[in-house]
Every structure is written in structure tokens, then in C-alpha cells.
């Protein structure tokens, strides 16, 4: 999905007269900028200074916005433009800390030598106790080869490190999990699998992140088969969980029975194929898909999906359409059928805007601004680690999606991603299903 936009903070001074902020907002909107946070920095007798966060397509559009604000009148000025995103990443976003204080020799002897030897011997006798006496059971490796970083493509693992750090921050804040970025300088499936297998002893789970298609499929499948800890590719299953939740909510608002609907997926990359499989696991009887890559169509056929030849045919055939292509404007309003549900999820520019889709006759439409993976992966891993399961199954993922739906307030597509109760609910739902599955195996 395309995310190649920029965020800048505009420090704007206006006269302290009502209506001037509206003039600034209108100028930004007329150029196509998207306003985020607005913070009042200073209110004076004559002027007010505000910090306005603005998302732009590129530097050229940013310059147009600055010029438009300065041209409103002689008393309104952009005093400066800052890049708060870059500032937030200075020095990195994560840091390992200890959970115990060492303030005396007694403390040192207890947490290190000689006292630690007893713990080592206990784990040697009963290896499963490592989950109790070490951080292993609460630590997830965030593994990437840098081949599919956001919408930027194959920029390499080091350039992708800010994303991996962001995942680690979200793991910590929403699930109390230690996420450790692992950057691999190879995309060879054999080498990736062997490397992860050799380091897996130090982790309670493996989150595969921003690994490109098609080698991401082989890597995940082999690691799930070879390891006895949870493995999940977030770009596949994390995206699919949150998308399923969004589709369920959209169907409720539109009065559509999801399991009886024909669902079309435009774009069969890692996310698109996973969404198809998740819908089928949920019970949707017919899931269609289209893509330019023959290998993607073969994968869809391999698990029972229906191949459709074109975007136009998908729009004509399907009651619900999901798009994850990264191609802005791919769906034309003339393609929309009366009563369709359309989720055009590419960011920041969807395949069709919700406004255009609704105007063309869609009963419900949304873009990808709210369909965020953060609603899924922290709670999914929290629940899996709590249950100490060996793998993450589709029933667990479906439980996570239903938990997200249940936590959604009336009128919303999905919950706010910063609501801690959502992540708690997802974790509890996943753990509950995991324990039932384990009991049935026993």
C-alpha cells in the first residue's frame, strides 16, 4: 500500500480574531493537504501562534500550501516548517531496560553470579521453566529482510529499522511484550529460515514483518512447520484480521449477510491473499480475486478462491469489494454497483474515495485510514504467549477479529487503535480459544 506522503508541522501566526484559523484550514484543504493535530502555542493580545500538523503528497505540495497560507493576507504568516517525525526518531525509539535494581552486593549476587547459577541449573533440568524464569516467554522477534517496507518497496532492512522499532514500541505499550528487531541481509528463503531457526530459542514468538511476496509465503510456512513457537506474518494475517473486522462492521451497517455475499479482492499480494483466506475461514461461500501476477492467481486457486479476470469484472460480480493495490483511482465511479460495500484500503490515496463510492451508489464505503494492523498483532501475540501455544491458528485469528468488532462503537468501522481495552479484549479472546484448542488436543 502506498504511504509515500510526508508530514510537516507548520508554525502559523494569525491575528487573534475569530475566523482566521478557518481561513488557514481552508487554504490547506484547497491545495489538498490533510490537517492532523492543531496545538495552540501562544495566545497574545494581537496574534496567536499555532502548530499545525499537515500531511502532504510531496515537498512541492507542501511549498504550495505554505505559499497559499502566506497569501491569505498580510497578517497571516507561516513562521517556520518543522519535521517532527524525524525528531521523534532521533536516537531510535526503543531502549532495553532492566526490571530489577542493582544497588548492593547482595543484589548483584542474587541476579548475577553466584546466585544465577541455581536458576541455570533449574532450567537445564526442566527447559520449559525458561518461560517462567527468563524473558523468553514474553519476547517476540520482529524479523524483516527489508523487501516490502510499507509502500516504499525493497529499501533494505536497515532503512526499514524505524518500522521495526515502531512495532516494538506498540508491542510494549499495548501488550507489555518485548519486541526485538532482527534485520536480515538475505532474502533467500533457505537462509532466512535457517537463521530464524538458529535464534528462535531466545524468543517466545516470531513476527515476520515487511517481507515481500512471493518468498514471504514460503518463509512463513516453513517456519511454522519447523518451530514450536507462534509465527505470524503481520502483513498477511494481521492485516487480514483487522480487515475482516472492518468488513463485518460494514455489513452490519449496510444490512448485508457476509457469509452469503460474494466478496471480491482486488490485489492479491501478501495482504490480499491473506484477506481471501480469512474470509473463507470465516465462512464466506464465494471469494473472488484479481491480480496481474499469474503466481498470485495460482495461490488463490490453491485454497479454493475464484479467479476473476479484471477489476471491471470484479466490480460487476461482487457484493463486497476490498482493494489493496496501492493504485490511486483504480476503481472508477462508473464501475460501482448500487448497494455495494467498498473498502478501498490503500493509503494515503485509496482506489476510490468513500465520497465518490457513496455518490456512485455504494451502500457503505471506507478507506484504509482506520484499518490499522496495530489493532491486531499486539493482542494476538499477548494471547498466544499467555497460553504458551506452539502456533497461531485460524480460530484464534477469527476470535481476534470478532473481539475487534465487539469493541467497535456504534457508527465506527473499527475501534480507535489507541484504546487499551481493544488490545486487552483481543488478547483475552485469543487466549481463550488457544486454551480450548490445547484442551481438545490433550
Image (cartoon, rainbow, N blue to C red):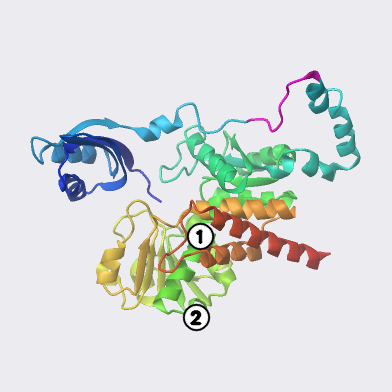
Confirm whether the magenta stretch covers residue 100.
Answer: yes
Please identify the quarter of the rendering in which residue 42 is found.
Answer: top left
Q: Position of residue 327 (x, y in %)?
A: 34, 55
Q: Specify which label sits upstream in the sequence, 1 or 2.
A: 1
Q: Which residue is mark 2?
A: 260
Q: Which residue is mark 1?
A: 242
Q: Position of residue 138 (x, y in %)?
A: 69, 43
- The magenta region covers 97-105
Q: Residue furthest front?
A: 45
Q: CA distance from mark 1 to mark 2?
A: 20 Å
Q: Residue furthest left?
A: 74
Residue nearest the observer in this picture, 156 or 231: 231
Q: What is the secondary structure assignment of the residue under circle 2?
A: helix
Q: Residue at x 40, y 57 (%)?
A: 368
Q: Is 322 left or right of 220, judged from the image as shown?
A: left
Q: Residue at x 41, y 46 (%)?
A: 151
Amino acid at each position: 500500500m502506498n504511504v509515500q506522503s510526508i508530514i510537516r508541522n507548520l508554525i502559523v501566526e494569525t491575528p487573534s480574531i475569530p475566523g482566521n484559523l478557518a481561513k488557514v484550514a481552508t487554504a490547506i484543504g484547497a491545495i489538498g493537504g490533510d490537517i492532523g493535530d492543531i496545538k495552540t502555542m501562544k495566545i497574545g493580545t494581537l496574534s496567536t501562534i499555532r502548530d499545525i500538523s499537515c500531511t502532504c503528497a510531496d515537498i512541492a505540495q507542501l511549498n504550495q500550501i505554505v505559499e497559499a497560507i502566506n497569501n491569505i493576507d498580510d497578517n497571516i504568516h507561516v513562521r517556520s516548517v518543522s519535521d517532527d517525525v524525524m525528531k521523534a526518531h532521533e536516537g531510535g525509539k526503543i531502549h532495553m531496560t532492566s526490571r530489577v535494581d542493582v544497588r548492593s552486593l547482595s543484589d548483584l549476587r542474587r541476579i548475577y553470579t553466584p546466585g544465577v547459577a541455581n536458576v541455570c541449573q533449574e532450567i537445564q533440568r526442566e527447559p520449559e521453566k525458561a518461560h517462567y524464569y527468563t524473558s523468553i516467554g514474553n519476547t517476540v522477534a520482529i524479523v524483516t529482510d527489508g523487501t516490502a517496507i510499507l509502500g516504499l518497496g525493497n529499501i533494505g532492512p536497515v532503512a526499514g529499522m524505524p518500522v521495526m522499532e515502531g512495532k516494538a514500541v506498540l508491542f510494549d505499550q499495548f501488550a507489555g511484550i518485548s519486541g526485538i528487531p532482527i534485520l536480515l541481509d538475505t532474502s533467500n528463503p533457505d537462509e532466512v529460515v535457517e537463521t530464524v531457526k538458529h535464534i528462535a530459542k531466545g524468543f517466545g514468538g516470531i513476527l515476520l514483518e515487511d517481507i515481500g511476496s512471493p518468498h514471504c509465503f514460503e518463509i512463513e510456512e516453513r517456519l511454522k512447520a519447523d518451530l514450536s513457537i507462534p509465527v505470524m506474518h503481520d502483513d498477511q494475517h494481521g492485516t487480514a484480521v483487522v480487515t475482516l473486522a472492518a468488513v463485518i462492521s460494514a455489513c452490519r451497517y449496510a444490512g448485508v449477510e457476509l457469509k452469503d455475499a460474494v466478496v471480491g479482492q482486488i490485489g492479491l499480494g501478501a495482504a490480499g491473499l491473506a484477506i481471501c483466506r480469512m474470509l473463507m475461514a470465516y465462512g464466506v461461500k464465494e471469494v473472488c480475486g484479481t491480480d496481474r501476477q499469474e503466481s498470485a492467481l495460482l495461490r488463490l486457486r490453491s485454497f479454493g478462491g475464484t479467479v476473476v479476470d479484471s477489476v471491471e469484472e470484479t466490480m460487476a460480480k461482487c457484493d463486497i469489494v476490498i482493494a489493496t493495490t496501492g493504485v490511486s483511482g483504480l476503481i472508477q465511479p462508473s464501475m460501482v454497483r448500487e448497494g455495494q460495500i467498498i473498502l478501498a484500503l490503500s493509503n494515503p490515496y485509496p482506489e476510490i474515495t468513500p465520497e465518490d463510492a457513496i455518490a456512485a451508489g455504494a451502500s457503505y464505503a471506507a478507506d484504509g485510514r482506520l484499518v490499522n494492523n496495530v489493532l491486531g498483532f499486539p493482542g494476538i501475540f499477548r494471547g498466544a504467549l499467555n497460553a504458551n501455544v506452539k502456533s497461531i491458528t485460524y480460530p484464534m485469528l477469527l476470535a481476534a477479529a470478532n473481539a475487534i468488532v465487539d469493541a467497535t462503537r456504534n457508527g465506527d468501522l473499527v475501534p480507535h487503535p489507541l484504546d487499551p481495552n481493544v488490545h486487552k479484549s483481543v488478547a483475552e479472546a485469543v487466549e481463550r480459544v488457544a486454551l480450548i484448542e490445547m484442551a481438545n488436543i490433550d
